Image: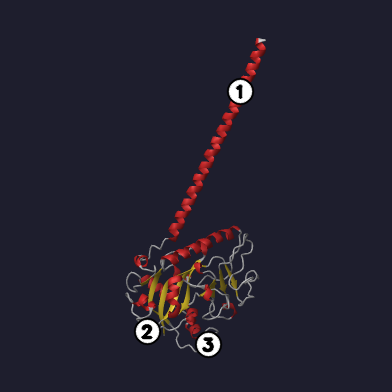
Amino acid sequence: MDEVLKAKQAGLERQFEAVTKAQEELYRDQLHQAERQKAEAERAGAKATKERDELRIARAMPDYWEKRIATSSLDGLAAIALDRTGRDRSTWAALERLLQTDPVKLKQSGADRRAPVTHDRLELACAWRLENPSLWEKYMSGVQGVMNDMKRIRQGRVASAGGAPPLTCRVADALPGDLRVDVNEAFLMHGTNAGVLINILSTGMNERFAGTAAGAAYGEGSYLAEDAGKNDQYTKVDQQYDGSSELHKRLYAHGARHPGMVFYILVCRVALGHQVRTQEHGPLATSSDTGRRVFPISFRELDTVAGVSPPVHHHSLLADVIGIGRRYREYIVFHSEYIYPEYLLAYQRY
């Protein structure tokens, strides 16, 4: 009888030990899992913090900006007159090169310039760097969006559109601040006039006004060009200084004098991203590379990039029309957050 009781007791002890061991193993597993989850959460938190810091640094104002005037002004805008012979002489020289254009093409009439042209040269008279922190942050947010899209497009192994790079790339290295290769950033120009310039300086380009000045053959977006000869077609003369003009107070009150009979071109940073290319105009235009419709739904938005899901829209349109007898190519952007006007050029015709 004692032996039976001893056997039962031993069996119970073995069961108890087994249960205890199982509970200990379960506890250790739960502890290890909790430690793994904590470590993963810490890594995810560190990654998110790093990404936020990188984004904050990326959105910070460029280190070559003057900053003080913009941050202390009531509207956060500063137009810094460039010194052509002093600290800004290399920037001035680069901006002068952007105004160089083929004199034969410049004198030709075309669809956007019917009147006879008497000048064959554009000469820089004044230049300003435009410092607008809120507009810069808006642009940096747009750049981040394009960057994210481009990562997905590259993952999908989608080929880039054809066409030569912008002519302005030959000058880009001479201007301060590197261009962002991952968003296909470029310097492009936009010809304008004094009547609307103060609005652009304050709030940036506005694609909603597309077509109000010269039509919208390639969609209802913001039109830019790589050649100042094209921009010159859309500028209007600013004859003389006007003390009541808000624009003139901004530009000519501190270090720059109105030289008389000037025209204005904006030099913009543009995140071209993944562009679509065409030689056709109008709503039925098709891509030169894929044959797909450029505007399948609306004249205000480009087609999506084939092979990417969820869909990503093309970021810009290249009117690659020199091969069909036109003088200049044009770039059209349909989202203003992809454009930052960084320099203003006042030039004269000769």
Mark with earlier residue (2, 3): 3
Give the number of the mark in front: 2 or 3.
2
Residue 111 picture location, percent across and down: 55, 84
State the residue position of label 3.
Answer: 114
Q: What element carries label 3?
A: loop
Q: The C terminus lies in which quarter of the figure?
A: bottom left
Give the number of the mark in front: 1 or 2.
1
Amino acid at pointer 3: Arg
The residue at the point 45 percent across, 55 percent down is 54
Residue 251 picture location, percent across and down: 37, 76
Quadrant of residue 289 within the rendered picture? bottom right
Q: Which mark is residue 57?
A: none
State the residue position of label 2.
Answer: 240
Residues under numbered marks 2 and 3 in contact, where contact means CB atoms less than 8 Å apart: no
Amino acid at pointer 2: Gln
In the rendered view, tell whether residue 331 sits above or below residue 239.
above
Tag 1: Cα neighbours inside 10 Å, few (<14), some, or many (≥20)? few
Q: Is residue 98 visible in this depiction of the protein?
A: no
State the residue position of label 1.
Answer: 16
Q: What element carries label 2?
A: loop
Between the residue at mark 3 and the residue at mark 1, the CA separation in whole angstroms equals 100 Å
Quadrant of residue 244 within the rendered picture? bottom left
Tag 3: Cα neighbours inside 10 Å, few (<14), some, or many (≥20)? few
Between the residue at mark 2 and the residue at mark 3, the CA separation in whole angstroms equals 25 Å
Q: Tell me if 84 is positioned left or right of 114 in this view.
A: left
Between the residue at mark 1 and the residue at mark 2, the CA separation in whole angstroms equals 100 Å
